[in-house]
Amino acid sequence: METETINLETKTPKKRSLTGFLVVGVIVMLMLLVVLTYLCLPYFEAGVPQLAAMSTEAPTLPPTQPPTEPPTEEPTEAPTEAPTEPLLPDEYLSPYGALDFQFEGRYLKCLRTETLTGIDVSSHQKDIDWRWVKASGVDFAMIRIAYRGYESGKIVMDSYAEANLSGAAAVGLPVGVYFFSQALNVEEAKEEAAFVLEAIAEYDITMPVVFDWEHVSDEDARSHEMDPRTLTDCALAFLGAIEEAGYTPMMYFNPYQARNDLYLEELIDYDFWLARYTKRMDFPYTVKMWQYTDSGTVPGIEGPTDINVYFVEE
């Protein structure tokens, strides 16, 4: 009895001190956990958007995706004598909606009709390996044949035009050409058409020959005062000369130009080439070709490239 009592008395204080030590240890650990959580909270909060951004970030070599419409597309000053929103006859309304296009591999295709994939290139793309271009799924090429200087007004042959025309043809790609115009009057537009016709005479041009007049933001550009009436007349002069020579003429423009720079209803006898950088077609009228990006990735070409959808049956 005494022995057992002594043992109980000697064991009870040990149990109490061990329990107390464990309680203190748990409290200390909880306090440390609270402190660490408080200190790390800003890092977790900062990391969430970073992880979210990484999950949506495109890989290094993505399938070609169009950028948003560039803010520099529309000039800062409204053109003089601006026509109203073009109202073309119902027969010229586009049959396609925003959901009629999707990417098949690298390039955008129409789900409702046959389309071809094309690129348009110039000296900006420098040397091109046309074998890789064709192997990637490109069906045709539009080559810049020449341009008129926006300061000097001189017509200049694109330094890579001959190499691009020959290179594309060598791998079996149909080719067309475009002229970057800064014509100020009908006489200059006719001069540009004559230059193009002479330059392409020895080539097999089966795709369109295009009049490409664009606004230039440089303050020294000679074309700042261009008005819709004159520009439309220049386009008609160029396109008429190309058609008379037996080629397929085409007019290049963006939605802003269609609304403000051109009398589009006077150009409906010619095919339209629309520059609109989006993967959803939202232009109300039928176009023959749609340039849906200016920053495409094409094997065989270093740097960004314009990519187009060509409507075979339209």
Image (cartoon, rainbow, N blue to C red):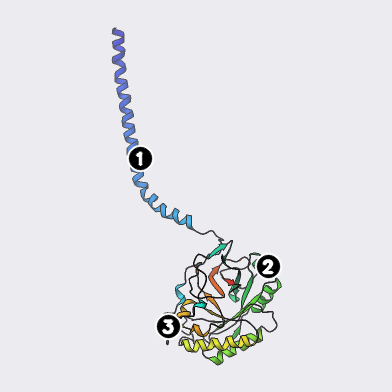
**Left or right: 265, with 119 as reference point:** left
Nearer the camera: disc 1 or disc 3: 3
In the rendered image, the vertical position of residue 210 relative to residue 69, given as above or below: below
The reply to whether residue 226 is in sight is no
Q: Residue at x 50, y 83 (%)?
A: 265
Q: Residue at x 28, y 11 (%)?
A: 5
Nearer the camera: disc 2 or disc 1: 2
| Position in image of residue 94 (x %, y %) | 51, 73
Q: Amino acid at mark 3?
A: Thr
| Position in image of residue 181 (x %, y %) | 55, 84
Q: Amino acid at mark 2?
A: Arg
Question: Which of the two labelled residues, at mark 2 and mark 1, occupies the earlier sequence position?
Answer: 1
Q: Residue furthest top?
A: 1
Mark 1 lies on residue: 33
Mark 3 lies on residue: 84
Picture quarter containing residue 259? bottom left
Locate the C terminus and report the quarter of the image it occupies. Answer: bottom right
Question: Which of the two labelled residues, at mark 2 and mark 3, occupies the earlier sequence position?
Answer: 3
Q: Nearer the viewer, residue 107 or 5?
A: 107
Mark 2 surroundings within 10 Å by alpha-carbon count, few (fewer than 14), some (14 through 19), many (20 or more): some
Picture quarter containing residue 225? bottom left
| Position in image of residue 137 (x %, y %) | 63, 65
Q: Amino acid at mark 1?
A: Leu
In the rendered image, the vertical position of residue 40 relative to residue 86, given as above or below: above
Mark 1 surroundings within 10 Å by alpha-carbon count, few (fewer than 14), some (14 through 19), many (20 or more): few
Q: Residue at x 60, y 71 (%)?
A: 118
Helix, strand or loop at mark 1: helix
Q: Rounded to the nearest whole Å, what is the CA distance between mark 2 and mark 3?
A: 46 Å
Mark 2 lies on residue: 131
